Image (cartoon, rainbow, N blue to C red):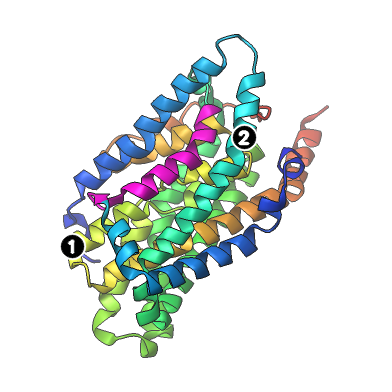
Amino acid sequence: MAAESRIGPFERYLTLWMFGCIGTGIALGRYWPEVFQAIGQLKLAEVNLPVAVLIWLMIVPMLLKVDFGALHEVKQHARGIGVTLFINWAVKPFSMALLGWIFVRHLFASWLPQDQVDSYIAGLILLAAAPCTAMVFVWSNLCDGEPHFTLSQVHSMTRLCCLPSRPLSACCSASPVSRCPGPL
Amino acid sequence: MLGLSSIAVPWATLALSVVLYILVPVLISQLWRKALLRHGDRGRLVMVLKRLHPISLSALLITLVLLFAFQGEQILRQPLVIALLAVPIGIQVYFNAGLAYWMNRQFNVAHCVAGPSALIGASNFFELAVATAISLFGFESGAALATVVGVLIEVPVMLSVVKIVNRSQAWYAQRTTTVIKARLP
């Protein structure tokens, strides 16, 4: 549908571009380490500023589609909100702990430095316990996601992260209506 | 398990991320949107979105180059460890995205909500994870390396999830339509 019609050379060969960029990145980091270490150091509280600017360029298109007047309509997506909260807080950290235990502690143990195994698993759990990033705006836009739903969810993830005890009142008042907006 | 309850949240990273990634871009976008819609027609907004599309995809690819360039030495120093750590993280992303997508389908949630829901379920706030790991275990720790692997695989893996969500639209709609048909008298 809408996603099909605007497929250009960019999207068609995205996998190819992607691997090209990964290779280029590794090569640049290898041959000009000083330059990229310097760019990597341009950060404030672990947030890299050049990457932050690029993330702006990526997320503005989705944010332009957000009509604040219509933001209250996300209530009609109550079940979607419920599923998202459930996965993020009740499944994700625990599935990662389980996968870390299976793969890092058991299956791959003989190939990994033994004294680091606990540390690797701790890192994996930290990764899974940290809720979604602003990059989700990009992913949502690429799959024609409902922009108001995405913004409200990213917002609530960040808020819940700050106040874990806040009651999950958002997922009450279920409504059977669900609809997708047009391209805007 | 890890004494996770006693973890110090890196508040500076969290606060700066919220301001930098949510507040500022939302403000700019809303002012811009208002300016574009000033004359009441959506034509200008549609045109700007069309022009921004390739720019935002280029920004995505440049981000990918930078993220790998920052870690280039680390990757070449211990490629096996990085590849091995990518396995559970990759499975984790597909499992959580798949579970969220399937649950939304079971609950007859619209596809345009199920997509972002699955992506949010799968995505990780890697800046926060990296900052927490470094502050707790140190820059050279295995924990910091594991979170860095999360940074490296975020873009490729999430793009593949986007592809799956777009391609499975027909499969997703099958259930919604049968339910609607069943509800009709």
Q: Quadrant of residue B145?
A: bottom left
The three-letter amino acid code for the residue at tag 1 is: Leu
Q: Is residue A153 magenta?
A: no
Compare residues A178 and B52 and report the one nearer the observer: B52
Q: Who's the residue at 43% across and 84% down the image?
A: A107
Where disc 2 sits, the SS reads helix
Q: Residue lying furthest right in this view?
A: B185
Residue B182, given in percent of the width and then of the height, sits at 79, 36
Residue A84, given in percent of the width and then of the height, sits at 48, 44
Q: What stretch of residues is rendered in magenta?
A: A43-65
Residue B146, given in percent of the width and then of the height, sits at 34, 69
Q: Is residue B116 above or below residue B61?
A: above
Compare residues B174 and A59 and report the one nearer the observer: A59
Helix, strand or loop: magenta stretch: helix
Q: Spatial distance from mark 1 to mark 2, Cα to Cα?
A: 43 Å
The residue beneath circle 2 is B51
Q: Who's the residue at 73% across and 40% down the image?
A: B176
- Chain letter for the residue marked with disc 2 in the picture: B
Compare residues A140 and B171 and report the one nearer the observer: A140
Q: How many marks?
A: 2
Same-chain status of marks 1 and 2? yes
The residue beneath circle 1 is B136
Q: Who's the residue at 28% across and 67% down the image?
A: B144
The three-letter amino acid code for the residue at tag 2 is: Arg
Q: Quadrant of residue B16?
A: top left
Position of the C terminus of chain B, as image quadrant, is: top right
